Image: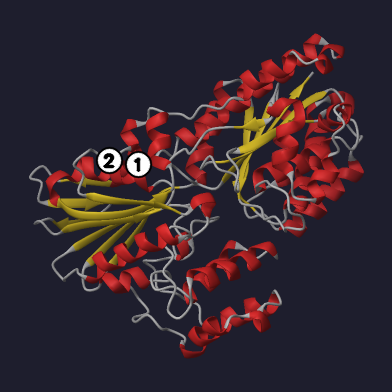
């Protein structure tokens, strides 16, 4: 079931405000159409990676019900099947798994976000819920994407189940984005609070997801192959919904079923780089000091099969098809957008102007300097797979509106005490960039949304902006730069036009990073 966004209703309410009636009616109609189409495209992104259908495509039972087939592998079933899972999409994955496996499933334990069962029930997504007499025990925790005591209890229950398995057993592991926060099991004497504080400090200083996971693995009982080791000698099958650029299985949820390739020296290098080594708690120093380069057993997890069943690539491919159905010439930029949100926003701002110039003949030849800056910025960001000149040439040949799609996870360096998330922060930065100079006879809309439906510690999935944002905000006495200086993008969007530009989905039950949509339509 596709998620519902309240973009258009909010915009309609906002149109009743006096601010809008000084603008041409045609301009307002254009904004409404773009906003509605952006809603539909974001719906298609989320709808393409709903956990149930993806899991059903990955798993099957033979007609006799004695073999479980996973891709090209088969596993014998004889009352020996157990299940564990952790992540934002795992509730729906577990429901689909139990529906398929039925009586073959002996026992299961999953760790899912706090409030997700109530959210799914409220949204009418009953296919995402376990049946009343399920054999799967559910723990809810990690409120606002942060590890907590509830998630710790879940992790210990998962560890206990894995520890009890034998060579005759098969463990099905369901993993999705958000799994790291939902599987916290620090190595004693490190406490949950100490590990959480260290992770928070690293994130605030701009550490990448790969760097964060390297530290998490070194301090965890279950990450970095720890769960696979606990389950040995049972066979392990991991079905993974990727929320990481490039889909590296060792990074997703910190790789609980993949042997860690990192050692203590890697951890110390990261801590030194961010100036945190001297401030480490004694317990962390103790764990790092006694760890060797391979603390968790065999280098190869020969008893494990890891399978990616869904990703950002799959989601954006569906959005591209939907955009074309709506009459757009749709082009995929990259599913590996990363780097600081300020620089990524500058990229999208420049891209809007350069692509707009290619799209509108009346602007041709006016953006030579900006085009050079765009190429320089792209070289700095080093975005994998982004063929800029090829895309711009295709835009120039387009007959009508253009949709540029991208995905990934930019990072935010915290410098204020405001409230927001990377999607709202990126959207607000892009809005500021679009307002720097006139774009010419092209309507531009940029949307950034998290496919999990929760952008940072807020109830919004993200936000969308157009080139008039700065001037319209000024008319309401709002200065985007002031809010950005405090990392307070959510507060800005709540106040701006009555919250019309926020995307609300509720928890979607899936997670494949973020989606960025850039719509350009000649006036």
> In screen coordinates, is 48 left or right of 82?
right
User: In front here: 5 or 440?
Assistant: 5
User: In front here: 158 or 396?
Assistant: 158
Is any part of residue 464 visible from this angle? Answer: yes
Secondary structure of the residue carrying numbered label 2: loop
Reply above or below: 62 against 188. Answer: above
User: In front here: 184 or 339?
Assistant: 184
> In screen coordinates, is 350 left or right of 175?
right
Q: Which residue is mark 2?
A: 130
Reply above or below: 270 against 92. Answer: below
State yes or no: discs 2 and 1 in contact (Cβ < 8 Å): no
Residue 398 coordinates in the image, percent (x, y): 70, 27
- Most extreme residue toward the top is 25
Based on the displayed image, in which of its 4 quarters is residue 130 positioned? top left
Marks 2 and 1 sit apart, C-alpha to C-alpha, by 8 Å
Secondary structure of the residue carrying numbered label 1: helix
Residue at screen point 65% across, 67% down: 201
**Label 1 crowding class (10 Å Cα cut-off): few <14, some 14-19, many 20+?**
many
> In screen coordinates, is 402 left or right of 475?
left
Residue at screen point 23% across, 38% down: 131
Reply above or below: 58 against 231. Answer: above
Of pointers 2 and 1, the one earlier in the residue sequence: 1
Residue at screen point 45% across, 33% down: 47
Which quadrant is the N terminus positioned in? top left
Residue at screen point 50% across, 39% down: 315
Q: Which residue is mark 1?
A: 92
Residue 378 coordinates in the image, percent (x, y): 75, 53
Based on the displayed image, in which of its 4 quarters is residue 223 positioned? bottom left
Using the image, tell me which numbered label, if any, was put on residue 52: none
Which quadrant is the C terminus positioned in? top right
């Amino acid at each position: 079931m596709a998620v519902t966004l309240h973009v258009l209703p909010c915009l309609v309410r906002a149109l009743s405000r006096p601010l809008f009636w000084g603008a041409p009616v045609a301009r307002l109609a254009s904004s409404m159409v773009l906003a509605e189409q952006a809603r539909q495209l974001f719906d298609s992104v989320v709808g393409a990676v709903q956990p149930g259908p993806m899991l059903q495509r990955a798993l099957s039972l033979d007609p006799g019900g004695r073999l479980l087939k996973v891709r090209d592998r088969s596993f014998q079933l004889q009352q020996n099947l157990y299940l564990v899972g952790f992540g934002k999409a795992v509730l729906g994955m577990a429901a689909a798994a139990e529906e398929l496996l039925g009586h073959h499933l002996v026992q299961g334990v999953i760790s899912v976000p706090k409030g997700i069962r109530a959210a799914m029930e409220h949204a009418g997504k009953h296919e995402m819920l376990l049946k009343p007499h399920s054999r799967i025990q559910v723990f809810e925790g990690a409120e606002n994407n942060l590890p907590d005591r509830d998630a710790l209890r879940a992790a210990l229950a998962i560890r206990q189940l894995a520890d009890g398995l034998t060579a005759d057993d098969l463990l099905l592991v369901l993993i999705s984005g958000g799994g790291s926060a939902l599987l916290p099991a620090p190595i004693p004497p490190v406490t949950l609070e100490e590990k959480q504080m260290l992770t928070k400090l690293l994130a605030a200083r701009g550490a990448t997801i790969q760097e964060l996971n390297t530290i998490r693995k070194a301090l965890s009982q279950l990450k970095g192959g720890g769960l696979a080791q606990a389950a040995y000698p049972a066979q392990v099958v991991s079905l993974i919904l990727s929320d990481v650029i490039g889909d590296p299985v060792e990074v997703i949820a910190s790789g609980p079923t993949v042997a860690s390739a990192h050692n203590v020296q890697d951890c110390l290098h990261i801590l030194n780089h961010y100036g945190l080594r001297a401030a480490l708690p004694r317990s962390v120093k103790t764990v790092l000091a006694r760890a060797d380069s391979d603390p968790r057993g065999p280098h190869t997890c020969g008893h494990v099969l890891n399978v990616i069943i869904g990703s950002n690539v799959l989601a954006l491919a569906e959005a591209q098809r939907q955009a074309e159905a709506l009459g757009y010439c749709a082009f995929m930029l990259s599913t590996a957008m990363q780097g600081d949100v300020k620089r990524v926003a500058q990229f999208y701002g420049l891209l809007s102007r350069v692509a707009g110039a290619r799209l509108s003949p009346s602007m041709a030849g006016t953006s030579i300097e900006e085009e050079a800056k765009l190429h320089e910025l792209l070289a700095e960001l080093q975005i994998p797979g982004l063929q800029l000149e090829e895309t711009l040439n295709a835009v120039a040949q387009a007959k009508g509106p253009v949709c540029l799609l991208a995905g990934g996870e930019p990072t935010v360096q915290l410098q204020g005490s405001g409230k927001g998330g990377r999607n709202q922060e990126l959207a607000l930065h892009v809005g500021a960039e679009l307002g720097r100079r006139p774009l010419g006879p092209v309507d531009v809309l940029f949307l950034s949304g998290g496919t999990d439906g929760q952008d940072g510690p807020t109830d919004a999935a993200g936000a969308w902006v157009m080139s008039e944002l700065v001037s319209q905000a000024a008319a309401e006495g709002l200065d985007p730069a002031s809010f950005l200086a405090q990392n307070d993008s959510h507060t800005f969007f709540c106040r701006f036009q009555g919250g019309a530009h926020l995307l609300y989905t509720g928890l979607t039950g899936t997670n494949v990073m973020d989606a960025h949509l850039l719509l350009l339509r000649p006036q």
